[in-house]
């Protein structure tokens, strides 16, 4: 994908839009199972999250200053997919606590002005959900059509060639011996897909939203939302679909009916004040991705996997950011992320070791200074790498255990082997780097990644230009991604060196000087100082934020 000509003039708007809470600051993803354990059973829980809220935001620059938290599923579940197989959309699994624990977490978060976003899984339920148990009773069941059941092909095989998103699972169809029909599951066989072509299903799922909205949640992260719209004819997919191929060949997801379904969901949220919906959308064409958010009556935000999958390359990053800006035309608000509970951590993906840690500092500056909402996965502010998982400790069907290792809160030498995460044995091994990469140690180190992320977060919170200023990319030479944020005469310049060499940015398109606000390098003076850009040398993997 090419650059979208962002070197030109910034867009002008006749009316200045209000900054919404979900645009102001970072949304911090909590995977409850691995965040903090309050009862010593080795599994994180809701009370553990409540106990750590001051770390996230206590009103001072010593906290992360997050705008909102996003909680991965905590609902009753057999845990075939660790909570993404839900057996009750309106409860809390005992391993995580109770509804009272959730209400207390919500109240304590709101007291700190932290919004709460919860995961909503509309594509599938657990095979233990009462709906599916009834659906499975027979072909004449009142809820048979709540799921996707089909007869076998003449040869006895599955109805089509659709495959599970999990390679280890294989076919997306499982034969039910009692009825002789197959049911569809886009993930494990314990996660049957709901049939959104049935209006009763749509209405029932809307009611699950209202249950949590009535309790006061501020929004939803909508799991694989593009999969609730499938080809009703269930036609075969091509044998090897590739990202970017035309929409019509993806018969198992992203069908044109998705947009009306999203409008129906949005109408439910709009029954309440100031709520937000962000979608996990595995669509790899930015033009199609923008369709999910640009109309103003569908998703507010969309997770951009095109951006997340980019290599560590300044030109690729710039081209993708510029293309999104050009395609959105100011009608869509971006959301940026580089890791989550399903994908390798930044440090490990971008080089590992000291190189990965240096790049993680640049990545943090990128996320907090781009126009759009940063999504930060727990532990990324500590520079955690993927944890090595011994074969006898592997539990996930799709190899995602390394990025789900528990958060180390204190040095193991002081707090014990679980590093303050738990007083018991953690459900997954912690990173061997926990002695160094823990929250307590980094809190006391002004040069740590945690301290840098806190500075960036609070700079953004106090600066309208970083929150909602216009953005345009600048030519600053090979290996450097440079962009300018501007609002009412205030200008902020970001220079990010993606290379392993020192470089002198090209100054043709840059201002003459700037007041240093933050650097990713420990050796750079952290106090505001005026820098001449004509003789500026960026260190390897260094990012600078300047007021110009």
Image (cartoon, rainbow, N blue to C red):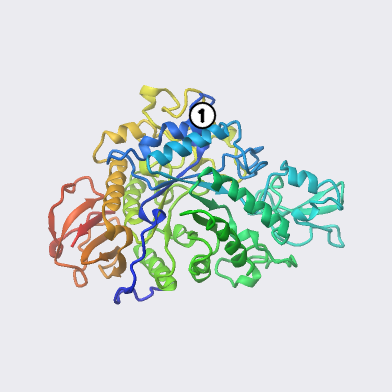
The residue that appears at 48% across and 34% down in the rendered structure is 104
- Decide if residue 49 is on the left or right side of residue 233: left
- Decide if residue 490 is on the left or right side of residue 473: left
| x then y, percent, for residue 458 | 28, 47
| x then y, percent, for residue 406 | 47, 35
Identify whether 544 is placed above or below 43.
below
Q: Is residue 428 visible?
A: no
| x then y, percent, for residue 215 | 54, 43
The residue that appears at 32% across and 41% down in the rendered structure is 450
**Mark 1: secondary structure:** loop
Which quarter shows the C terminus? bottom left
Circle 1 residues within 10 Å: few <14, some 14–19, many ≥20: many
276 vs 150, nearest the viewer: 276
Q: Is residue 132 visible?
A: yes
- Decide if residue 66 is on the left or right side of residue 492: right
Q: Which residue is mark 1?
A: 426
326 vs 296, nearest the viewer: 296
The residue that appears at 35% across and 49% down in the rendered structure is 360
The residue that appears at 54% across and 56% down in the rendered structure is 271
Identify whether 432 is placed above or below 344.
above
Which quarter shows the N terminus? bottom left
| x then y, percent, for residue 443 | 29, 35
228 vs 535, nearest the viewer: 228
């Amino acid at each position: 994908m090419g650059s979208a000509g962002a070197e030109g003039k910034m867009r002008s708007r006749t009316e200045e839009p209000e900054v919404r809470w979900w645009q102001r600051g970072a949304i911090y993803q909590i995977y409850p199972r691995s965040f903090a354990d309050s009862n010593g059973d080795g599994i994180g829980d809701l009370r553990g999250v409540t106990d750590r809220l001051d770390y996230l935001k206590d009103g001072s620059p010593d906290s992360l200053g997050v705008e909102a938290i996003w909680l991965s599923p905590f609902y009753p579940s057999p845990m075939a997919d660790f909570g993404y197989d839900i057996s009750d959309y309106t409860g809390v699994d005992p391993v995580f606590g109770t509804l009272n624990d959730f209400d207390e977490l919500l109240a304590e978060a709101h007291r700190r002005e932290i919004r709460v976003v919860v995961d909503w899984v509309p594509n599938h339920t657990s095979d233990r959900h009462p709906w599916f148990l009834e659906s499975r009773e027979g072909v004449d069941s009142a809820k048979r059509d709540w799921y996707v059941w089909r007869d076998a092909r003449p040869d006895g095989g599955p109805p089509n060639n659709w495959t599970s998103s999990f390679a280890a699972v294989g076919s997306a169809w499982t034969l039910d011996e009692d009825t002789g029909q197959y049911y569809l599951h886009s993930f494990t066989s314990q996660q049957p897909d709901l049939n959104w072509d049935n209006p009763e299903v749509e209405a029932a799922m809307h009611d699950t939203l209202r249950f949590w909205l009535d309790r006061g949640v501020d929004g939803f992260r909508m799991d694989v939302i593009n999969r609730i719209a499938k080809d009703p004819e269930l036609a075969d997919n091509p044998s090897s679909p590739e990202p970017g191929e035309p929409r019509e060949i993806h018969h198992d997801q992203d069908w044109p009916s998705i947009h009306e379904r999203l409008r129906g969901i949005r109408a439910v949220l709009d029954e309440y004040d100031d709520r937000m919906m962000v979608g996990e959308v595995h669509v790899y064409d930015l033009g199609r991705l923008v369709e999910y958010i640009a109309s103003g009556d569908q998703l507010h935000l969309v997770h951009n996997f095109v951006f997340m999958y980019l290599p560590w390359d300044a030109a690729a990053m710039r081209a993708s950011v510029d293309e999104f800006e050009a395609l959105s035309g100011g009608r869509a608000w971006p959301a940026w992320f580089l890791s989550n509970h399903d994908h390798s951590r930044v440090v490990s993906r971008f080089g590992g070791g000291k190189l990965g840690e240096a790049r993680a500092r640049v990545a943090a500056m990128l996320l907090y200074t781009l126009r759009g909402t940063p999504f930060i996965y727990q532990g990324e502010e500590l520079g955690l790498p993927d944890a090595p998982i011994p074969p006898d400790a592997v539990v996930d069907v799709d190899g995602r255990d390394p990025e789900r290792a528990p958060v180390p809160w204190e040095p193991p030498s002081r707090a014990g082997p679980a590093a303050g995460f738990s007083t018991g044995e953690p459900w997954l091994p912690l990173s061997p780097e926990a002695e160094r990469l823990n929250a307590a140690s980094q809190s006391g180190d002004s040069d740590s990644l945690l301290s840098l992320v806190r500075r960036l977060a609070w700079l953004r919170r106090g600066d309208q230009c970083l929150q909602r200023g216009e953005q345009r990319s600048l030519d600053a030479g090979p290996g450097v991604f440079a962009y300018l944020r501007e609002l009412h005469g205030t200008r902020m310049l970001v220079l990010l060196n993606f290379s392993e060499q020192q470089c002198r940015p090209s100054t043709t398109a840059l201002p003459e000087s700037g007041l240093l606000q933050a650097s990713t390098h420990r050796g750079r003076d952290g106090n505001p100082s005026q820098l001449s850009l004509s003789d500026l040398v960026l260190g390897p993997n260094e990012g600078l934020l300047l007021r110009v």
